[in-house]
Amino acid sequence: MADISNAFGEAIRLIAAADPDLIEIVGLSLRVSLTAVAVAAGIGLPLGALLAIARFPGRSAVNVLVNTLMGLPPVVVGLLVYLMVSAQGPMGALQLLYTPTAMIIAQAILVAPILAALTRQTVSDLNSEYDEQLRAWGVGAWQRAGTLLWEGRFSLLTAILAGFGRAIAEVGAIIIVGGNINHVTRSMTTAIALETSKGELALAMGLGLILIAIAFAVNAAVMAVSATRTRSAFA
Amino acid sequence: MQRTATDEGRSLPTQALPILATGLRVVRDGRVLVDDVDLKITSRDRTTAIIGPNGAGKSLLMRILAGLMVPDAGAVTWAGAPPNRARAQHVGVVFQRPVLLRRSALANVEYVLKIAGVPAHDRPSRAAVALDEAGLTGVAMSPARLLSGGEQQRLSLARALALSPDVLMLDEPTANVDPASTAAIERRIGKARDEGTCVVLVTQDLGQARRLASDVVFMHEGRIRERTAAEQFFAQPTTREAAMFLKGEIVL
């Protein structure tokens, strides 16, 4: 018990003193996950809108693929990306293994299907609501996709926040492709796993507290978004 | 049995007029909803009211004329060619339930102007004029979907008229609207007609048809039973069904 409370006190001290190692790890985590979510949004939102609006051969196959990828365990995604970027893999020449870029790729693959599926649902609902009116205006397919994405902006923002929550909390994929290398690919979750196994509880707990704070902030942002959409009936 | 055509108003060539329907037929689940409908709408400054009992096929007919639905048989042409996307902006449509974008009232009108290719720097002023004519200047910046039902429908009408369409089609525009907004909407429709818009109005409201229509298309069980000048129709309907409908009796 004394160990734990000592570690807790030490954790607080590390945070309060803005310990350089801690700051570096938090910074890398945020950089990796924010970039991954941006990439995932760039893929998932257009793909979701396309699946909601367009009818093309192979559409149901893509739907099944998206649904399957959505449920993939992070370690499996990590393994797949590892196979891609390892020296013998198809992207081996790029030497991405154990770099933040590999971590970004892995997290983007984890988050993109979630964003695509949520976007597909949102845009599909909006499409049935607006279909006749948009046709009456002669709106083309691309314009329709853009319009419906904008009409669904609050739902989509919530989905993006949920995607960020998944990315920042994930450990299985980035520990495989990142390797938890100090000063290079050490993130909050991989550092917690390592430090805890070493019995170094202070840094692990400090990082855990910051993760909890981030989860809290994401949820507060989701609630703020939902309050705004209700208040302004833009929903 | 149709009376002589009453389209004697201005018949200037436009992108959308004349609207010509021939041999329209719609069948759903074995029920014939629209049958044997021929209709020609040519004049810019007249209002054609499509009236008839519930389930007569009025709204369906309007959707087909607007190019929003393809009939099972027959065809519609706008100015000699099938309805197409490029000319959609010449045919304004107002639905019974307004479909408003999740933006401000002003942004709703600006959106339509953008779709039609109006340059960005002209949109705010043109949208503001459209809102002003609808008496909505005070709520220009309000979220459109927070407006009252009447305001929403006035916005829907203002949006449809912002592009000065050749034809304005309305599907029971005041069915869910308060009396004051109904009066405002009817005034705005009348003004558009006076400015040379061809109006096609589907309505259940006989008072509204009397106030606005210059021509009447009376539908019953999917067919056009009478098509005549409004005055004549209301004074002397020629079919038994129309006479009963005007008396407020249920038409079987």
Image: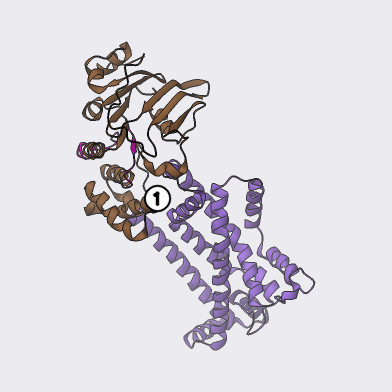
Chain colours: A purple, B brown
Q: Nearer the viewer, residue A35 or A2?
A: A35
Secondary structure, mark 1, is loop
Q: How many marks?
A: 1
Q: Which residues are magenta?
A: B162-184
From this view, report whether residue B30 is shown above or below residue A133. above
Residue B23 percent location from the top left of the image: 47, 22
> Could you tell me if residue B141 is visible in this image?
no
Q: 10 Å neighbourhood of mark 1: few (<14), some, or many (≥20)?
A: some
Q: Nearer the viewer, residue A32 or A56?
A: A56
* Quadrant in which the N terminus of chain B appears: top left
Give the side of residue A18 with respect to residue A188, left or right: left
Residue occupied by mark 1: B116
User: In percent of the image, x 37 and y 58: which residue is there?
Assistant: B119
| Picture quadrant where residue B161 is located | top left
> Could you tell me if residue B123 is visible in this image?
yes
Give the side of residue A158 with respect to residue A166, left or right: left
| Picture quadrant where residue A28 is located | bottom right
Q: Nearer the viewer, residue B222 or B65?
A: B65
Tell me if residue A180 is in the magenta stretch: no
Residue B162 percent location from the top left of the image: 31, 47
From this view, report whether residue B216 is shown above or below residue B104. above
> Mark 1: which amino acid?
Ala
Q: Nearer the viewer, residue B138 or B200?
A: B200
From this view, report whether residue A152 is shown above or below residue B92. below
Residue A42 percent location from the top left of the image: 55, 63
Give the side of residue A73 with respect to residue B97, left or right: right
Query: Which chain is home to disc 1?
Result: B
Residue B183 percent location from the top left of the image: 20, 37
User: In percent of the image, x 63 and y 80: which residue is there?
Assistant: A186
Give the side of residue B226 with respect to residue B235, left or right: right
